[in-house]
Image (cartoon, rainbow, N blue to C red):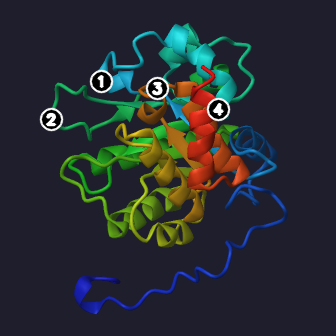
Amino acid sequence: MADLDEIKAEKDYHLDKPFTTVGDFHVKGAGNLDWGMRKRLSNIFNPKTGNTVMFAFDHGYFMGSVSGLERLDLLIPRLAPHIDVLMGTRGALRTSVSPSFRKGVALRVSSGSSMLNDDLSHETLAVDIEDAIRMDADCMAVQVFIGADGQKDSIDTLSKVVNAGNRYGVPTLGVVAVGKDMERTDRYFKLATRIIAELGANIVKTYYCDRFEEVVAACPVPIVVAGGKKLPEKEALDMAFKAMQGGASGLDMGRNIFQSRYPQAMADAVSKIVHENFTINEAWEFFEDTRSCL
C-alpha cells in the first residue's frame, strides 16, 4: 500500500505555486461545476475576496442549550449583519432566523448521538435534499469522522449528501470531526481533508495546525477553518490570521464569537482579517476600538 511509514516517499506540495483553476471563477476547485453550484458557492464566498466568514450556531443538535446560544432569536439578528454565512440546523433556522436574511446559509444535515453518549461518531442523514432545497440552502453540512469507530457510517452519509447535491446543484460542506481520541496533527488533517474532498465535498471545514499550508495545498477544494473551543479574543484573532496566511478560504467561528463579551466586535474583527488582510495587531486594535463603542 502506498505511503506506509516504512516506504514513505518525500512529498512535494509545491507551496510556491497557486492551485490551478479552470477559468476565472473565484472558488477553488469549482471551475468545472455547473451554474447552480457556482451561484450557491458565490453566496458563500465573497466574489471580491474569494473568502468567507461563517457563524456556526449548530451546537444545539448534540449539546442542547449552550452558553451563549440560549436565545437564538435574540442573538442571530444582532450578528447577521456582521458575517457572510449562517451555519445552523433547520429547526434553528426556521424558528429563529428571519426569511429576509439575504446572506449565505449552510444547513446542517447530519445528526447523531448527544453529549450523553461517549461516541458521537455514528451520525446519520437527518435532512433530505428536498428540505434543503425548500430552505434555499447554499450548502449542506455533514460531519465526517475519519479514523473513528463510525467512519464508515459518516462516509456513507457524506456520499449520499454529495450525490443528492450534485443532482440538484447544492454544494456539500464536509466537516472534519476531531474526537477525544483523534490526533490534531497535520498528518491527520491532510488525510481527513483529502478524503472528504475526493469523495466529492465542495468545501471542507477543519482545524488550524502546524504545517497548515501543506494541508491547504493538498486539498483541491476551499478549506474553512473552525474556531474550536473558546479562546481569549486576541488568541482567537491570532489563529484566524495564521489560518488565512496559511491559505484558508475563511473562518467558521462559533464559540469564539457567541461566547465573547463583545460578539459583534469579534465578528467584525475576524471579517477584517478575512476580507481586508488585517494583521493581528490591526485586528486587535480594531476589536478594542469597536468594543469600546458598544
Asked whether residue 201 is in view, the answer is no
**Separation of marks 2 and 4 at Cα, in angstroms:** 33 Å
Q: SS at mark 3?
A: helix
- Look at 51% across and 60% down and name the residue there: 242
Q: SS at mark 1?
A: helix
**Residue tagged 1:** 63
Q: Amino acid at mark 2?
A: Asp
Q: Amino acid at mark 4?
A: Ile
Residues marked 1 and 2 touching at CB (< 8 Å): no
Residues marked 3 and 4 touching at CB (< 8 Å): no
The label on residue 83 is 4
Point out the tag, 3 or 4, that comes first from the N-terminus: 4
Residue 237 drawn above or below residue 107: below
Residues marked 1 and 3 touching at CB (< 8 Å): no
Closer mark to the observer between disc 2 and disc 4: 4
Asked whether residue 275 is in view, the answer is yes
